[in-house]
Amino acid sequence: MIRRMILPLLFGLTGAAVLSGLGIWQVQRLAWKTDLLARIEARIADAPVALAEATGDYQPVQLSGRYTGQELHVLASLKREGAIYRIISAFETPEGRRILVDRGFVPATDKTAPRTGGQATLIGNLHSPDEVDFFTPEPDLATNIWYARDVPAMASALGTEEVFVILRKTSETPPPVTPLPVDTSGIPNDHFGYAVTWFSLAAIWLGMTAALLWRIRRKNRAGHWG
């Protein structure tokens, strides 16, 4: 009887070990992602530096210059607002640098409304949005509708550097566009759910193994007494 139970027992324990290992890995990933998000949040809240001193994504920067009047419109949606357009503008510094500024959003009905430009002092965060994938439609250049913030393509369209600043504060009063500051809400952190799934599967696997062993034992006893 014991020999007949060894193989199912080994198979059950091995499967449960593999599933539990995946759960432990997800717990480790959860700790890593939680720490990463905390570091990003801390970086976002740092004191702003001059654009020339900025070192990478999420770095707060402060700069002055002027909006050139060129802008691109990114179709999106926002909870409690519905359809919106993110306004991506070309911005020129006194040193002659031309960069992209995500000024925030306007309701879809205000897509073509005139917006004040000219001189402004900005505080924002450097960012490199990764929104383009295989399913992203090409921008409709005739109507100036984009479907993702594609920094290289936008920089090419507006003749700027591939430098992208998400606006947080502006000297414009009142701001003609509602800022959407960068944060970590768009960075997924689903590792806790994944860990629960793997540990649950391990428990189910062990339960199924125990049920199988019980059936084997019962069958063997019935055969013995029969």
Image: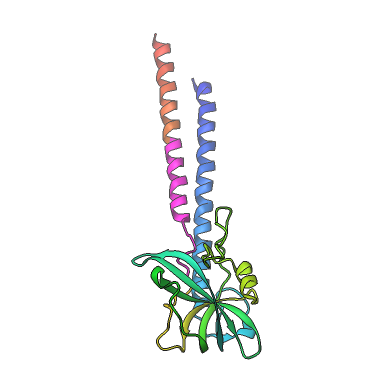
Relative placement, left or right, of 61 versus 169 is right
Q: Position of residue 200 (x, y in %)?
A: 42, 44
Q: Magenta span has 191?
A: yes
- 24, 61: nearer the viewer: 61
Q: Quadrant of residue 131?
A: bottom right
Relative placement, left or right, of 117 versus 53 is left
Relative placement, left or right, of 193 versus 101 is left
Residue 199 visible: yes
Q: Residue at x 43, y 52 (%)?
A: 193
Range of magenta residues:
183-206
- 124, 80: nearer the viewer: 80
Vertical placement of residue 174 versus 74, above or below: below
Relative placement, left or right, of 14 versus 214 is right
Q: Position of residue 181 (x, y in %)?
A: 46, 75
Vertical placement of residue 186 versus 63, above or below: above
Q: Position of residue 180 (x, y in %)?
A: 44, 74
Q: Residue at x 47, y 50 (%)?
A: 194
Q: How many marks?
A: 0
- 93, 199: nearer the viewer: 93
Q: Residue at x 41, y 16 (%)?
A: 221
